[in-house]
Image (cartoon, rainbow, N blue to C red):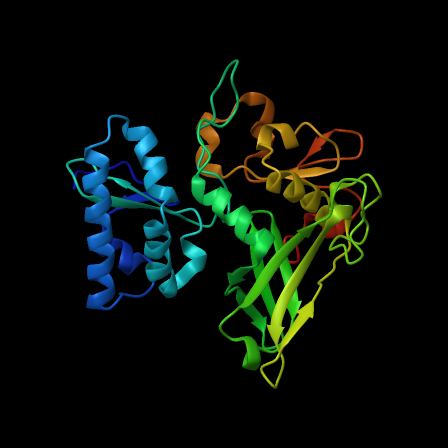
Amino acid sequence: MSEHNRTEHDQEIDMETASNLLGAIPDQETMEKVKALAMEKESALQSSADMEDAQVDFYDTADLNEVHELIAASEQDRIECSEISPAAGGGQSISIGGNNLARSKRIYKKGVDAAPAHVSTQVVKTQMELRNGRFYRGYWERDTVLIVRVHTVLALKVHTSKANNGSGVIVRAEIRPPGEKHPNAWATQAQEDDPAARLGFRITVKDENKHDCLIYPQTDGEGYLFRANGFVEWMAGDSDEAIANRPRRYVAIPTHYKGYVPDDIRIFVGGAYVDNDGKRRKRLKPDRKASSSDDG
């Protein structure tokens, strides 16, 4: 495989290297299945007249979902932005996203058109899974507190037992229709016209008898509310640029896109808020909680 430009957050690798990066090496049988599926799809791609459209078709096939399931057993949280695509010189490559969970792979264009040039089909898949229930391993802050990051700017604190849920939990984002408040809204300070008022997270955990139980975590603080507002709009397909032009929002553009971000939204590289008056700030005042990302 030819050399590719590589960054800390987005690198092109072959199948063997991918398995190592993902935290565990699949067994030989699994690896052969992955390679066989990749070769089958490569053949289909080579016969396509439109390579760009073929990549989308390739990604949307049931077989590709099988590839993800085979690899994801090693460490799901590190491939949420991954894509499989034809590599230069033949073969397949996997593009693995870093810590920008559930964010679209995008190119910001300076000038008239500042919209992202590409939205990953994996992002759409993630959004759909969140609406139906998505498995997350998360990380344990302590034996009774699990932190689950469902989005670059939003994490949930789940009070449950590590002994019963050590492998992870299922998270479902419940978003009510406009004008309807969620009875267990995650952001408790959400006002009636805040998108966050419509958002609740249903967490499925196991009790000591291994029975399913439902938890609706909640949090307070303006900062978490602003993050939740943006999350609801991201789930609806809105871009960072659109969200950044609304009050009571939080947007975090990954730092490795800094050189491509238009000047008018550069403050959001690394994260920034839009306050109640529409002013853009790195931190909110006087609410000290708003600057913390531990809970939201």
Front residue of 161 and 70: 70
- Point out the image quarter for the N terminus: top left
**Image height of 290 relative to 258, above or below:** below
Residue at 70%, 38% in the rendered image: 249
In this rendering, position of residue 52 left or right of residue 132: left
In this rendering, position of residue 11 left or right of residue 231: left
**Image height of 166 relative to 8, above or below:** below
Res 275 quadrant in image: top right
Residue 130, how many percent across, how many down? Answer: 57, 53
Q: Which residue lies furthest to the bottom in this view?
A: 209
Q: Which residue lies furthest to the top in this view?
A: 112
Res 17 quadrant in image: bottom left
Res 51 quadrant in image: top left
**Image height of 95 relative to 25, above or below:** above
Residue 246, how many percent across, how many down? Answer: 71, 30
Front residue of 218 and 290: 218
In this rendering, position of residue 5 left or right of residue 234: left
Residue at 76%, 54% in the rendered image: 185
Residue at 21%, 42% in the rendered image: 42
Residue 228, how many percent across, how many down? Answer: 69, 46
Residue at 60%, 52% in the rendered image: 131
Residue 157, how many percent across, how many down? Answer: 65, 63
Total numbered labels: 0
